[in-house]
Image (spheres, coloured by chain):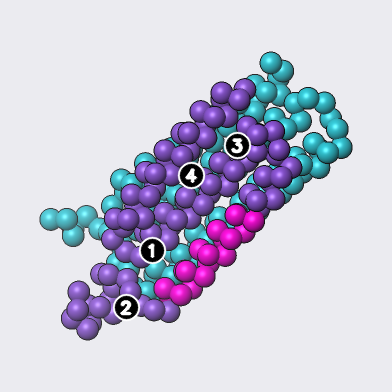
């Protein structure tokens, strides 16, 4: 097992951990804005780490032109996720504020 | 290494099922939208893992790119639509002024 495989295993396992944290936050938080806070950051980093890990593992048997081009495409997916996911988070939060969803406060539970 | 990819794919599939609970039971429409966005992110990763398992990454990368683009556009479109249609969100000021909710 080469060092590239070990690094990509670490990346993919870390990404799965962040996906797990984002899912727990999505299920357990009390409010729409708090759920947005959990998934907006956790899913972005989780998808980024998994995709970067796959792009690294794609290069594990020699640097050929085809595999390098495929890895560049995979890294484009990671860059797109890093740009698009916070934009979508911002748009939904703005939509919720404009539609008048009331944020969760502690006094409402009494 | 194939075992690791298959295990990661199964874990992400189970997390997708857990997110599906929020799609079904979310109190507001926006909860459902963000849960569908989370499912789309996981699907982008699962498609790449499937490409590694089948040994055809160069084919699955294109499907994954198109899925990520569609996920982004669908989220933006739904956010813009429900921003205009204020009456759909439960617990909003609009419904309280009307005395419906």
Depth check, front residue: B79 or B16: B16
Q: Earlier in the sequence, mark 3 or mark 1?
A: 1
What is the secondary structure assignment of the residue under circle 1? helix
Q: Quadrant of the C terminus of chain A?
A: bottom left
Q: Earlier in the sequence, mark 1 or mark 2?
A: 1
User: Disc 4 marks which residue?
Assistant: A42
Q: Is residue B100 left or right of residue A96?
A: left
| Residue A12: % across, % down | 58, 32
User: Disc 2 marks which residue?
Assistant: B87
Depth check, front residue: A50 or A35: A50
Q: CA distance from mark 3 to mark 1?
A: 29 Å
User: Disc 3 marks which residue?
Assistant: B49
Residue range corresponding to the magenta coloring: B66-83
Residue B30's tag is 1
Disc 4: which chain?
A
One can see residue A61 in this view: yes
What is the secondary structure assignment of the residue under circle 3? helix
Q: CA distance from mark 1 to mark 4?
A: 18 Å
């Amino acid at each position: 097992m080469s060092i590239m495989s070990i690094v990509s295993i670490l990346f993919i396992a870390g990404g799965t951990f962040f996906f797990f944290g984002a899912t727990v936050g999505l299920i357990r938080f009390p409010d729409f804005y708090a759920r947005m806070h959990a998934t907006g950051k956790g899913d972005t980093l989780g998808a980024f780490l998994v995709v970067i890990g796959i792009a690294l593992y794609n290069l594990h048997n020699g640097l050929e032109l085809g595999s390098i081009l495929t890895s560049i495409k995979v890294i484009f997916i990671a860059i797109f996720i890093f740009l698009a996911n916070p934009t979508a988070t911002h748009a939904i939060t703005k939509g919720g504020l404009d539609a008048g969803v009331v944020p969760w406060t502690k006094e409402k539970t009494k | 290494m194939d075992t690791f990819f298959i295990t990661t794919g199964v874990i992400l599939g189970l997390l997708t099922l857990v997110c599906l609970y929020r799609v079904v039971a979310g109190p507001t429409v926006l909860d459902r939208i963000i849960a569908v966005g989370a499912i789309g992110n996981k699907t982008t990763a699962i498609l790449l893992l499937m490409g590694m398992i089948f040994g055809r990454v160069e084919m699955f990368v294109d499907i994954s790119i198109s899925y990520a683009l569609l996920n982004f556009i669908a989220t933006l479109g739904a956010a813009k639509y429900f921003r205009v249609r204020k009456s759909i969100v439960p617990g909003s000021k609009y419904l309280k002024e009307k005395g419906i909710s």
